[in-house]
Image (spheres, rainbow, N blue to C red):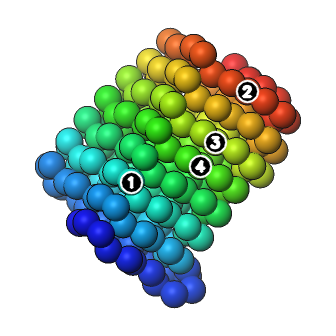
Amino acid sequence: VKNCIISMGNGLWGFGIRFSNVNNAYILNNTFTNQVIGTYFSFVNNAYILNNTFTNQRDYGIYFAVVTSTEVRGNIAKNNSVGIASILSTSNTIIENTVLGNTRGISVGINSYDNTVSDNVVMNTLGYGLSINGGSDGTIVTNNVFTSNGGDGIRMDSSNNGEFRNNILNMNFIGMSI
């Protein structure tokens, strides 16, 4: 899916794009506004979500469940409930995204193993900038900027073997909570 404008109008229902049981999916250079979820992936392997804009999604800009080897890069998630979220997902990369003014920033949760969160800017959320929880072991977090978030810049709980390097945490309610 490339170069589309997808809007559901009032944000009360619907997904902008839903992929399920798919290999090698590409979502490139699209604009999503006013859905419940901008992009929903489930049981997807080797996907690319690149250079899209997600604005005013009621729940999630980008949401994926049971996804492996997927790259989320260069997207803008603005004024959504959650900018980017994953559950039960392994070996994914969330890189070079801008997450602004959401209720919550990026979530890696519920047994999402060996994921990388790198080179993102997350700011002005009401809650956390990045949450890693629910047994999401082996998450690598590098070179991100978390600033002016109403909760933790980075929060990790009930997860092990996280690696945190070269992140900037500025003017968050709590810088980092582990």
Which is nearer the N-term, disc 3 or disc 1? 1
Q: Amino acid at mark 3?
A: Val
Secondary structure of the residue carrying tag 3 is strand
Q: In the shown orientation, is residue 124 left or right of residue 91?
A: right
In space, the residues marked 2 and 4 are separated at their CA atoms by 15 Å
Compared to residue 8, the image places residue 107 above or below, namely above
Residue 18: give x, y in percent of width and height.
31, 66
Which residue is under mark 1?
51
Residue at left 47%, top 38%? 96
Q: Dot 2: within a 10 Å radius of its alpha carbon, few (fewer than 14), some, or many (20 or more) residues? A: many
Residue at left 72%, top 50%? 125
Which residue is under mark 4?
99
Residue 9: give x, y in percent of width and height.
51, 87
Q: Which mark is residue 169?
A: 2
Q: Amino acid at mark 4?
A: Val
Which is nearer the N-term, disc 2 or disc 1? 1
Q: Amino acid at mark 2?
A: Leu
- Which quadrant holds residue 150? top right
Could one spot residue 94 in this view of the protein?
yes
Compared to residue 69, the image places residue 27 above or below, namely below
Which is nearer the N-term, disc 2 or disc 4? 4
Which is nearer the N-term, disc 4 or disc 1? 1
In space, the residues marked 4 and 1 are separated at their CA atoms by 13 Å
Which residue is under mark 3?
122
Residue 174: give x, y in percent of width and height.
82, 29
Which is nearer the N-term, disc 4 or disc 3? 4
Residue at left 59%, top 49%? 99
Count the marks: 4
Q: Amino acid at mark 1?
A: Asn
Q: Which numbered disc, 4 or 1, marks the residue closer to the eye?
A: 1
In space, the residues marked 4 and 3 are separated at their CA atoms by 5 Å
Secondary structure of the residue carrying tag 1 is loop
